[in-house]
Amino acid sequence: MIDLLRRALTQLGALSANPVAFLIIVTYGVFWFLLERSTFDWHGIATLATWFMTLLIQRAEHRDTQAIQAKLDELIHAQVRASNAITRIDDEQPEDIERHREQARKED
C-alpha cells in the first residue's frame, strides 16, 4: 500500500512538473478574474502565487531527481566508459534529462 502511495505521489510530482501545469494556473487565474472579479482580491492573488511557487518547487525537485537518476544510469550502464559530460546534467531541463536517459537505454 505504501509503495503504491509513493508511486502515485511521484507520478503527481512528475505531472505537476510539466509546463502545461503552469498554463493551467494562468488560465484559471484569467477566468477567475474575468468571471468572478468581485472575489479576485489579494487573497486570490496570494492563492495563485502559492500554486505557482509550488509548481516551481516541484519542477526543480523533479529536475534534480531526474538528473541524479541519469547520472546513476550512466555509471551503472558503463562503469568503464562513464563520461564527465554527465556531471553537468543538473543544469538541464527535465525533458532534456529524460531524452538523455532514453538515448542511454537505446545504446545498451
Image: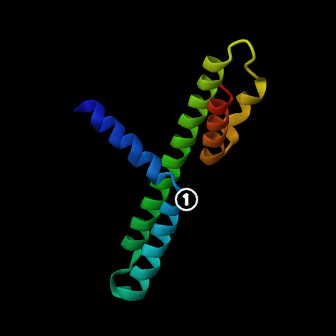
Q: Secondary structure at mark 1?
A: helix
What quarter of the picture does the C terminus occupy? top right
Residue plotted at (40% across, 40% down): 10
Depicted 2 relative to depicted 33: above or below:
above
Count how many numbered circles sit on residues in the image. Answer: 1
* Apparent side of residue 13 relative to residue 83 in the rendered image (left or right): left
Residue 5 picture location, percent across and down: 28, 38
What quarter of the picture does the N terminus occupy? top left
Residue 4 picture location, percent across and down: 28, 36
User: Of residues 104 and 93, which is closer to you in this image?
Assistant: 104
Q: How is the image coloured?
A: rainbow
* Apparent side of residue 35 relative to residue 77 in the rendered image (left or right): left
Q: Residue furthest left?
A: 1
Residue plotted at (46% across, 68% down): 24
Residue 11: which quarter of the image? top left
The residue under label 1 is 19
| Residue type marked 1 | Pro
Residue 3 picture location, percent across and down: 29, 31
User: Of residues 29 and 82, which is closer to you in this image?
Assistant: 82
Residue 34 picture location, percent across and down: 42, 87
Residue plotted at (58% across, 29% down): 68
